Amino acid sequence: MNESMKASSKTGSDINHIIAIVSGKGGVGKSSVTSLLACAMQRKGYQVGILDADITGSSITKTFGITAKATGEEGRIEPATSRTGIKIISTNMLLSEESDPVIWRGPLIANTVKLFYTDVDWQTLDYLFIDMPPGTGDVPLTVFQSLPVEGIIMVTSPQQLVSMVVEKAVNMAATMQIPILGLVENYSYFLCPDNQKRYAVFGESHLQEIGERHALPVLARLGIDEQLSLACDQGAIESYEGCDLSALCNTLEER
């Protein structure tokens, strides 16, 4: 799509880099990876925001312990700010109760995602991370066509099935002419606290093969960690420091 046809901020926000976090299927921990990456980049001194584009399955506010509702006036929405200064917008901030279902048709969902970019007063950000819904449906299509996304980070898990869904997401990215910066494998292993051995709970990884086939680097392999699950449940993701995302952060900084 011609860059001149991309949506622009109505609030005068200045966003240097927009990165989409995607997965070919649900349940691979894409939102937790988005949250961890945002925290990692914020600790490095960058101004960071998260646009939760998973409209019907939003979880970012829970992860960061945000209960405030969105405020603002016509044409301008104020994002929430986390404890460490990360700006966040999510559908949960528009609902009376966070447990209320979002029963919307595709066009309304897609337009809401676009609104979260154009009408939210992000002010100045170094990085805006878009937590995408899984798959290759309406929302990914809207985001890739309408927003100035610079690159994609793809989150996967070790199951054999993943190779097929990764192929679909890779092909979509190629069609939309947006580069994939690299792959992150979640649930890659379980580190047993008793013997310090790593166990491949979901089977042996095939991510390296997938990466080589598409000339994509593997930027991180994250294990199953009870402490991370607890931090997410308690809205304390910003206090968790149990994973290494240095290669992923370096990739973003080198662009």
Image (tube, grey):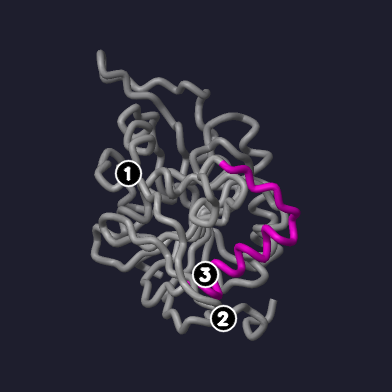
Mark 3 to mark 2 CA distance (whole Å): 14 Å
At horizontal 43% and vertical 69% (from top left) the residue drawn is 78
- Which label is found at residue 150? 3
At horizontal 29% and vertical 48% (from top left) the residue drawn is 238
Question: Mark 3 or mark 2, which is nearer to you?
Answer: 2
Residue 216: tell me if it is visible: no
Which residue is at the front of the view, 181 or 226?
A: 226
**Above/below status of 34 relative to 75:** above
- Describe the element under mark 3 as helix, strand or loop: loop
**Residue type, mark 3 in image:** Glu
Q: Is residue 116 magenta?
A: yes
Q: Quadrant of the N terminus?
A: bottom right
- Describe the element under mark 1 as helix, strand or loop: helix
Where is residue 89? Give x, y as percent.
Answer: 47, 60
Where is residue 115? Give x, y as percent.
Answer: 59, 69
Relative horizontal placement of residue 225, taking residue 172 as reference (left or right): left
Contact check, label 1 and label 3, Cβ < 8 Å: no
- Find disc 2 in the rendering and name its residue: 8
Q: Which residues are magenta?
A: 100-120
Relative horizontal placement of residue 156, taking residue 126 as reference (left or right): right
Mark 1 to mark 3 CA distance (whole Å): 26 Å
